[in-house]
Image: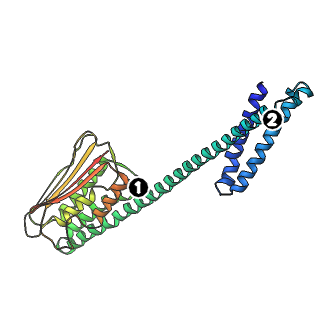
């Protein structure tokens, strides 16, 4: 009796793994259905014949008993074996397809991550030339009117370059590092500003060990200095970082809002467009970015869940 029970199970397992490891992948998934069905039919017939043969050889006690075996019972056994083997084949197809889809999904995610990583690198490298271009334009404007200030500005720029070239090569930096970079940039901008401009900062945070993607905030500050200062009217720039909740950082930049032509609107340009793309990739569903304007003030708010 044990032989009759375990032999079909062993053959079913053999049929399952032959299909799972070889036939489904090499024939079925390549749409060679004729070859797939033909080989499986041969295997099923071979296994049924083997079961019947060994049963007659080892289990039947005598030739008379073998001749007297009920034909309907034999037919029933063959049908039962066939059904069991077919289930094994169907199961192997299902498992192989699921496995194939899992592998495809893993590969797709890998390719997507590689693409996002490459895009992030491209966006990060876009920031630096844009940043240097704006700063060098500022230094150029000082070379004739205030050469000493120009020298001091170049020295300050070298410190910022060190941060850009080395620290920002990492995917994340501490809030302390990033906010110190913002402070140095603001100090650098103060050197070249002339006129009645009020600049205030509140960038002292506790829990500054939290990590953040580098160079997220600088486009907002750059934007304020580029568009928020008037050469003839009183102007202001306020920069603040604070915790909205325990893990939600709020970075706010507000500046004077003076009417400009369509080609020079606050909130436009490479820096802001770049920032929005990076936020979508780095903090999907974990950030809010708003820019609002009225007659006197332009405000940029960036909220990130860290």
On screen, residue 35 above or below 154: above
Q: Quadrant of the C terminus?
A: top left
Task: Pick whichever of labels 1 and 2 is earlier in the sequence.
Answer: 2
- In the image, taking residue 140 as reference, residue 236 lies left or right, namely left
- The image shows residue 21 at horizontal and vertical percentages of 68, 46
- The image shows residue 185 at horizontal and vertical percentages of 25, 58
User: Looking at the image, which is closer to me, 27 or 265?
Assistant: 27
Q: Residue at x 13, y 64 (%)?
A: 257
Disc 1 crowd, CA 10 A, few/some/many (<14, 14-19, 20+): some
Q: How is the image coloured?
A: rainbow
Secondary element type, mark 2: helix
Q: Residue at x 77, y 29 (%)?
A: 4
Snapshot quadrant of residue 69: top right
Which residue matches tag 2? 51
Secondary element type, mark 1: helix
Q: CA distance from mark 1 to mark 2?
A: 67 Å
Disc 2 crowd, CA 10 A, few/some/many (<14, 14-19, 20+): some
- The image shows residue 196 at horizontal and vertical percentages of 8, 63
Looking at the rendered structure, the number of numbered marks drawn on it comes to: 2
User: Which numbered tag is attached to residue 169?
Assistant: 1
Q: Pointers 1 and 2 in contact (CB under 8 A)?
A: no
């Amino acid at each position: 009796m044990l032989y009759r029970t375990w032999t079909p199970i062993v053959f079913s397992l053999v049929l399952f793994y032959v299909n799972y490891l070889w036939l489904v992948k090499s024939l079925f998934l390549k749409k060679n259905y004729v070859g797939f069905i033909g080989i499986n039919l041969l295997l099923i017939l071979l296994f049924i014949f083997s079961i019947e043969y060994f049963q007659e050889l080892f289990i039947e006690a005598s030739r008379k008993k073998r001749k007297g075996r009920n034909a309907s019972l034999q037919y029933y056994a063959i049908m039962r074996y066939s059904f069991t083997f077919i289930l094994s084949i169907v199961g192997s197809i299902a498992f192989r397809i699921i496995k194939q889809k899992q592998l495809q999904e893993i590969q797709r995610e890998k390719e997507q991550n590689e693409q996002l990583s490459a895009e992030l690198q491209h966006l990060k490298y876009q920031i630096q030339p844009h940043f240097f271009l704006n700063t060098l334009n500022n230094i150029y404007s000082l070379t004739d009117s205030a050469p000493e200030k120009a020298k001091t500005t170049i020295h300050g720029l070298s410190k910022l370059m060190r941060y850009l070239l080395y620290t920002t090569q990492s995917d994340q930096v501490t809030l302390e590092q990033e906010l110190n970079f913002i402070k140095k940039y603001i100090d650098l901008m103060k050197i070249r500003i002339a006129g009645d401009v009020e600049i205030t900062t509140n960038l002292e945070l506790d829990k500054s060990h939290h990590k953040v993607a580098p160079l997220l905030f600088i486009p907002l500050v750059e934007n304020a200095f580029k568009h928020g200062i008037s050469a003839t009217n009183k102007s202001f720039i306020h920069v603040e970082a604070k915790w909205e909740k325990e893990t939600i950082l709020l970075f706010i930049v507000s500046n004077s809002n003076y009417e400009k032509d369509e080609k020079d609107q606050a909130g436009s340009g490479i820096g802001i467009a770049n920032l929005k793309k990076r936020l979508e990739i780095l903090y999907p569903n974990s950030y809010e970015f708003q820019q609002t304007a009225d007659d006197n003030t332009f405000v940029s708010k960036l909220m990130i869940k860290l």
